[in-house]
Image (tube, rainbow, N blue to C red):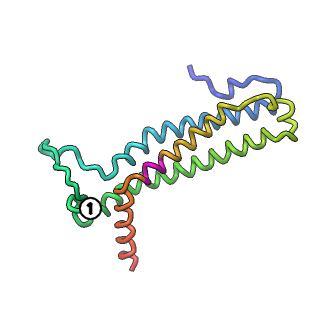
Amino acid sequence: ERVLPQDLVDTEHDLLRKVLSVLIFLSDEVIDLKIQAENKLYKPLQMFGQNAPANADGKSDEINDDDDDALKPGDREKMIGQFLPLLQDLSNFIERCYSVSTNIIQQLASLLKPKEHLYRTCFSQIHLVSMFKSLGDLLLILITLDSMIENNETIKECWNYYKTMISYIRN
């Protein structure tokens, strides 16, 4: 049976119910973003530029220490060109993460103002550990994606070749 988050909040205090519903939905969104990152983004980013494990005949490719000999002219541009849809999805995903993190921070900032009536009546003695954990998970996703891209030299190399090709096309 599926229980909706708004069904978990049952209180007579309307404002408290609204605030808790927003926090629950934001936490749920972070969980969805984490699953999406793990299932759709991490593996392709990690594997970009890796040699294929086997040829069509089943024999393994020889791993060459010099990447320049392994790739023919135009291969880098093709690799990044085929990778562009994932990069667009990654860009959209990161924008969504930014908006969710901004929303979480704004919600927490408005709740934790000592001058606010809601803070004095409801949240002065409450520690919102789960929301800070959700924010931490979201920042961990962004740091992981950044690290994967920064540490993959093939992405940077292919991207530079692709930008050079695009500048030639424009001219």
Specify the quadrant of the image occupied by residue 14: top right
Q: Verify whether residue 96 appears in magenta.
A: no
Give the answer, above or below, for where 36 lies relative to 122: below
- The residue shown at (15%, 46%) is 56
- 149 is within the stretch colored magenta: yes
Name the kind of residue labelled 1 in the image.
Asp
- Judge from the rendering whether residue 30 lies leftward or rightward of residue 152; answer left or right: right
The residue depicted at 80 percent of the width and 28 percent of the height is 125
Query: Is 102 drawn above or below residue 26 in the view shown?
Result: below
- At mark 1, the secondary structure is helix
Seen in the picture, residue 68 relative to 103 is either above or below; the reply is: below
Identify the residue at image location x=87%, y=37%: 117
Placement of the N terminus among the 4 image quadrants: top right
Q: Mark 1 = which residue?
A: 75
Q: Residues within 10 Å of mark 1 (few under 14, many from 20)?
A: few
Residue at 54% x, 37% y is: 32
**Residue at the far bottom in the pictured view:** 171
Residue 116 horizontal/vertical position (percent): 86, 40
Horizontal relation, residue 20 to residue 33: left or right: right
Q: Within the image, what quadrant is residue 79 found in?
A: bottom left
Q: At which x and y percent is residue 5?
A: 65, 28
Q: Report the magenta residues as a range.
A: 145-150
Q: Please tell me whether residue 101 is drawn above or below residue 31 in the rendered image.
A: below
Q: Is the stretch drawn in magenta largely helix, strand or loop?
A: helix
Question: In x, y percent, where is residue 36?
Answer: 48, 40
The quadrant of the image that shows the C terminus is: bottom left
Q: Position of residue 50 (x, y in %)?
A: 29, 49
**Quadrant of the image occupied by residue 82:** bottom left
Q: Decide which of 139, 33 is in the foreground and name it.
A: 139
